[in-house]
Image (spheres, rainbow, N blue to C red):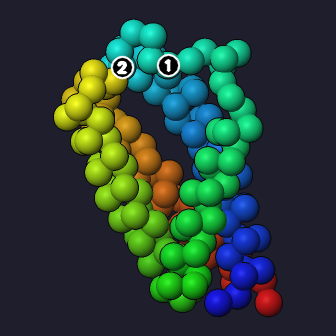
Amino acid sequence: MNTKKVLISGIVGGIVFFLLGWLIYGVLLMDFMSKNSSSGVMKTQDEFVWWALIVSNLIFGILIAYVLNAVGNITSTGKGSATAATIGLLTSAGFDLGLYATSNVSTLPGLVADIAAITFMNAIVGAIIVIISKKIK
């Protein structure tokens, strides 16, 4: 395993996750997700714990980089995108369905939108991680 490749591409992937999360959840889906989650569940941006959000995105970036580089040795952007999208679909569906089954955090449309958004974000991040990984010796 090339640790340098996993860490660098994973950090870049984490930054892309953060930016896509802002665009998708903070801009495009903000009103929709607010209407499809329980009142009082979502924090305002002033209440965010920013360090935890940043670390979360970096961890997900490194996870995808680890799977693509160390486990799968994937060098095709298409395969990297598809593999990362599959990881996003399975992890978000498993987590979101568990929350849906046991809490009132989200409506069913909110759950579907979240799974779709995370799958899309993972697909983009997977392709970018492969591109960055190819540039690292």
The residue positioned 33% from the left and 19% from the top of the image is 36
Lateral position of residue 111 relative to residue 61, left or right = left
Vertical comparison of 116 with 76: above or below: above
The residue positioned 42% from the left and 72% from the top of the image is 83
The residue positioned 58% from the left and 75% from the top of the image is 66
Q: Nearer the viewer, residue 56 or 79?
A: 56
The image's mark for residue 11 is none
The image's mark for residue 37 is 2
- Give the residue type that dot 2 points to: Ser
- Give the residue type that dot 1 points to: Met
Vertical comparison of 5 with 94: above or below: below
User: Do the residues bearing badges 2 and 1 touch, measured as CB atoms within 8 Å?
Assistant: yes
Identify the element where label 2 is drawn: loop
Residue, far top: 39
Quadrant placement of the N terminus: bottom right
Q: Mark 1 points at which residue?
A: 42
Q: Quadrant of residue 2?
A: bottom right
Instruction: Tell me residue 99's x, y (percent).
Output: 29, 35
Examine the rendering and report whether any part of residue 86 can be seen. yes
Binning the other alpha carbons within 10 Å of mark 2 as few (below 14), some (14 to 19) or many (20 upward) gives some
Q: Distance between the residues labelled 2 and 1?
A: 8 Å
